[in-house]
Image (cartoon, rainbow, N blue to C red):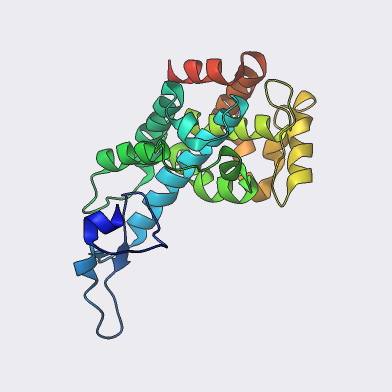
Amino acid sequence: MVADTICVCDAWTVVCEPFFQWVSQDSFADARPPYERLRTQLVADVEPYELMKPRLLYASHQGLCYFAHLMGYRLVRDAAVHPLNAAFLRAYMDEEGSPTLKPVPGIDLDAYKSELIARFSNPSVRDTVPRLCNESCDRIPKWLVPVIVDQLAAGRSMALSAAIVANWVRYAEGTDELGQPIDVADRLKYPVMQNAAGFAADRNSFLQDCDRFGDLVDEPTFARAYDRALELLHTVGARATLVELLA
């Protein structure tokens, strides 16, 4: 294909997805290369773009992986084409992730969000669900908790974000819906699993970790949404929980 397309014989060809995005703050101390010739977006302030990526892309990874693992998926592409998963991701991005962003000049957010789901669904990429579940104790606090905090401060809904946290808890219990063991890969594996196992005695045992969740355990709006999602996951399972959340 490479030889036919660009007349180069390359035995080490690397095939990549078509998506490309490179944003750079145009505040160099001296002369710079002509980055704009390479499709680079040069901007006055890079912070809005830095918020967009973790709160839409990375948080959506978390929104997908726990539901997907409990539902039996092991490849991201297979999970992302399931209509319930795709609808949940888009609802999270539209209703909770996007409202916390600053204006992002030059970016069509609707197109960006659609492209994210298409990228997750790419049949040529063998990204795995367990990889996205790894090291959640670092990922959730950085990418999702700020969304929850901003939504609460603005008086907006964070029910879908709360459900993602509840899903992490259900996953961290260490057994899927078929009774198969889950290999929880996390640097804080044992305290995370211990906190998840405390659900029976204390519904908010997982949220007591102030290093991960701050004072969210004391936010009644969040706690109610979290409790409802966790209860659904235990009683009706991941698929039916998605249906309820999207209703």
Q: Is residue 58 visible?
A: yes
* Residue 140 occupies quadrant: top right
Q: Is residue 215 visible?
A: no
> Taking 44 as reference, is 59 left or right?
right
Q: Residue at x 38, y 53 (%)?
A: 15
In percent of width and height, residue 148 lies at 49, 39
* Residue 25 occupies quadrant: bottom left
> Taking 172 as reference, is 111 left or right?
left
Of the pair 177 and 194, the residue shown nearer to us = 177
In percent of width and height, residue 147 lies at 46, 43
From this view, report whether residue 23 is shown above or below residue 220: below
Q: Residue at x 44, y 24 (%)?
A: 82
> Taking 144 as reference, is 15 left or right?
left
Q: Quadrant of the C terminus?
A: top left
From this view, report whether residue 237 is shown above or below residue 8: above
Q: Residue at x 29, y 52 (%)?
A: 1
> Taking 194 as reference, is 108 left or right?
left
Of the pair 193 and 34, the residue shown nearer to us = 34
In percent of width and height, residue 190 lies at 79, 44
The total number of labels drawn is 0
Q: Residue at x 42, y 39 (%)?
A: 120
In percent of width and height, residue 139 lies at 57, 49
